[in-house]
Amino acid sequence: MQKSKEIKTLDNYAFIDSQNLNLGTLHAGWKIDYLKFRNYLRTKYLVKKAYLFIGFIGKNASLYKHLQECGFILVFKNVMEIKRNGKTTYKGNVDAELVLHTMIQYKKYRKAVIVSGDGDFYCLVEYLSSKDKLAKVIVPNQTYSSLLRKYSNHIFTLSQVKHKLKVETKK
């Protein structure tokens, strides 16, 4: 009896919490190369579309252009500007948008790759897993929500491939 070959096609989608990814890798001591990361998602997880959820700040136009050139589909969130002690910070929680877009696109992908270690996505991970639509939960480093540990068989720590995905410093 001959085994049928599984045809590998790009039919998975990634949904990425950009703040969690960026801060998580920086906290682990490295900076992610987004072009390498997009290629990694394509080759390792057969990701056809990679949605990156990010707060919109006008002065970051060149960053947004770069991310789009890397192959990400950007979903912007309005941010709140917070001024304290002469410093300006921005707050833009993308959790609701990420969950909403994951469900809007639900019938278009075979499996979802969720990139975040945030426990706020527990219900999404639980639902996708129950419907056999969860490919992987990629967490930036070893520090991620204990709520997600129930799905440890789906969790991959990005720091394991840091050597492939980090920004190379010029010598």
Image (tube, rainbow, N blue to C red):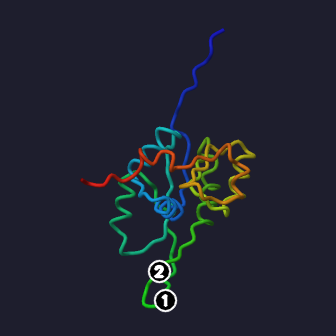
Q: Nearer the viewer, residue 21 or 110?
A: 21
Give the left or right position of residue 146, taking residue 53 as reference: right
Q: Tell me the kind of residue under disc 2.
A: Thr
Q: How many marks?
A: 2
159 to 90, vertically: above or below = above
Identify the residue under disc 1: 84
Q: Residue 62 at x, y = what percent? A: 33, 66
Secondary structure of the residue carrying tag 1 is strand
Residue at screen point 51% across, 46% down:
160
Give the left or right position of residue 154, taking residue 67 as reference: right
Residue at screen point 67% across, 64% down:
120
Secondary structure of the residue carrying tag 2 is strand
Which quadrant of the structure image shows residue 58?
A: bottom left
Residue at screen point 62% across, 58% down:
144
Furthest residue to the top? Answer: 1
Q: Nearer the viewer, residue 65 or 21?
A: 21
Q: Residue 169 at x, y = what percent? A: 30, 55
Residue at screen point 62% across, 56% down:
104
Q: Marks 1 and 2, Cα distance to the nearest angstrom?
A: 8 Å
For label 2, the crowd category at 10 Å Cα-Cα, with few meaning under 14, some 14 to 19 and many 20 or more, is few
Quarter in which the N terminus is drawn: top right
Q: Tell me the kind of residue under disc 1.
A: Arg
Identify the residue under disc 2: 89
First in sequence: mark 1 vs mark 2: 1
User: Does the residue at mark 1 contact the one at mark 2 (Cβ under 8 Å)?
Assistant: yes
Q: Which mark is residue 131?
A: none
Q: Nearer the viewer, residue 23 or 54?
A: 23
Which quadrant of the structure image shows residue 57?
A: bottom left
